[in-house]
Each structure stands twice: as C-alpha cells, then as structure tokens.
Image (cartoon, rainbow, N blue to C red):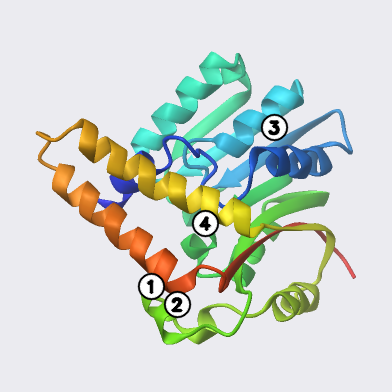
Amino acid sequence: MDRQTISRLAHARHPIAAPVADEAVARLLDRATGRTEEGRALDLGCGEGGWLVRALTARPRWQAVGVDLDAAALTRARESAQALGVERRIGLHHQDAREFRAAAPFDLVLNVGATHVFGGLLPTLAAARDLLAPGGLVLVGEAFWEREPARAALDGLGAARDDYADLATTTDRVLADGWTPLYGYVSSVQEWDDYEFSWTGSLAGWALDHPEHPDAAAAREAADRHRAEWLHGYRGTLGFVTYLLQQGR
C-alpha cells in the first residue's frame, strides 16, 4: 500500500492533515482572510482541500488554487467543493508544488503540515515569497520540539535531532528570514491525541471493514506501527505551530 493511499484512508475523518481542531482552523482562516472582502489563496500541498474549501465557504468573494501530487485526494477536494457549492471558485492542479508557477500573485499562501515538500520551513517560506502579492500573508504549519527528544521519539518519527528546533528557536529563524508573525497557534495535547487516534483508527477501521481486500493486512500493520511510534515515542515531545506571517521587519 503506497503512502498516498495510507494517508488518504487515515485522514478520512480528519481531513485537515495536521493536529489542528476545526475551531482553530476557522480562527486561523478568519485571521488570514479577514482583511479583505476578496482575494486569492494558494495551498501548496493541498491534499483534499480542507483549508481552501473552508476558506471559500466563509469568504464568498475569494478564489483559490490547490496543488498536490495525489490525484485521488484532488478528486475528493473537487467533490467537497461541489458539495459546498464553491467549485467554480477553486482550481486544482495535479503537479509537484515545487514546480508550480502562477501568472498572478496570491494574497494568501498556505502550507500546513507539508513543509517537507520543499525540504523544511525556510525553503517553504522562500517558495511562498515568490508567489505572494505585496502585503500578502502566509499560513504555514510546522513541527517543533516541545522537549528534548529521546531516542524513542526520534526512532518513532524517523527523524534526526536537527530536523526541528524548539518553539523559540523556530520563531527566531522565521524572524531572521524577514517575516513578522501576526499570529501563532500551538496545537494542544488534546488536538494531537485526537489527530493521532483518528489517523490510526480510521486506517485500522478500514482494514476491519475490508478483510478480504489485498491491502487490509498492510493497512492494519501501518496503523499499529504508527500508533506504537506515537504512544511509545514522540507523544508529548513533538509540537506543532501554525504561523500567520507577513513579510517585513
């Protein structure tokens, strides 16, 4: 079973692919889009379009573009947009986000939980900078160390100590790169637990509901492995912050 399929099944009941609750998503989007009645938003690694569809539903004069390599996720994004009546205001592109180019800049660029596409937080911000209109905003979500990671946490994540920093250092790096945080939201332990239990439970539940499927055993194995890596490894160690940023110091 490929990673894209696993991710799609695991996020069936938590379409926002990050430990951020629906109420926080709404609050972040309100801050990100509330300055103007109309605008253009771009999600670099949009998955099933959860952020963009919510933004368009709340802002009837905004338009959006999403970019992702997962064709099946983009199909679900189109279905969600159609169900909510915003399909005419969203364009979805099946391509590598690193290769996306636009004829006109965007008022808001998003990348929440997908900075790995660009190789980390600062390269993601560099990509966003090239696509932003003057005065535009970036909504970016990134992991950080809540505490010094033990070997079990690093092994569970398949990560190195230097892959992330603590919250203060992460914020300092954003500032040094020429960005001003207008807002920052740190996900709670409850949000992490809800996200991880939903991720593993949705995947394991699919395996239980499809016992004859050739991928059922692989799905159950992936769910069990991920649950163990989280509970016995990085729970309470890995944090997640979503910044709303504007260029300038």
Image position of 135 (left or right of 236): right
Q: Hey, what amino acid is under mark 1? A: Gly
Q: Quadrant of residue 154?
A: bottom left
Dot 1 corresponds to which residue?
156
Which residue: 23% across, 49% down? 220
Residue 114 badge = 4
Give percent across and percent down for residue 190: 61, 53
Which residue: 45% across, 77% down? 153
- At mark 1, the secondary structure is helix
Cα separation, mark 3 vs mark 2, equals 34 Å
Discs 4/1, front: 1
Q: Hey, what amino acid is under mark 3? A: Ala
The first of marks 3 and 2 along the sequence is 3
Dot 3 corresponds to which residue?
55
Cα separation, mark 3 vs mark 4, equals 18 Å
Q: Is residue 229 visible?
A: yes
The first of marks 3 and 1 along the sequence is 3
Dot 2 corresponds to which residue?
153
Cα separation, mark 2 vs mark 1, equals 5 Å
- At mark 2, the secondary structure is helix
Determine whether 224 is above or below 163 in the image.
above
The first of marks 4 and 1 along the sequence is 4
Front one among 178 and 84? 84
Q: Quadrant of residue 35?
A: top right
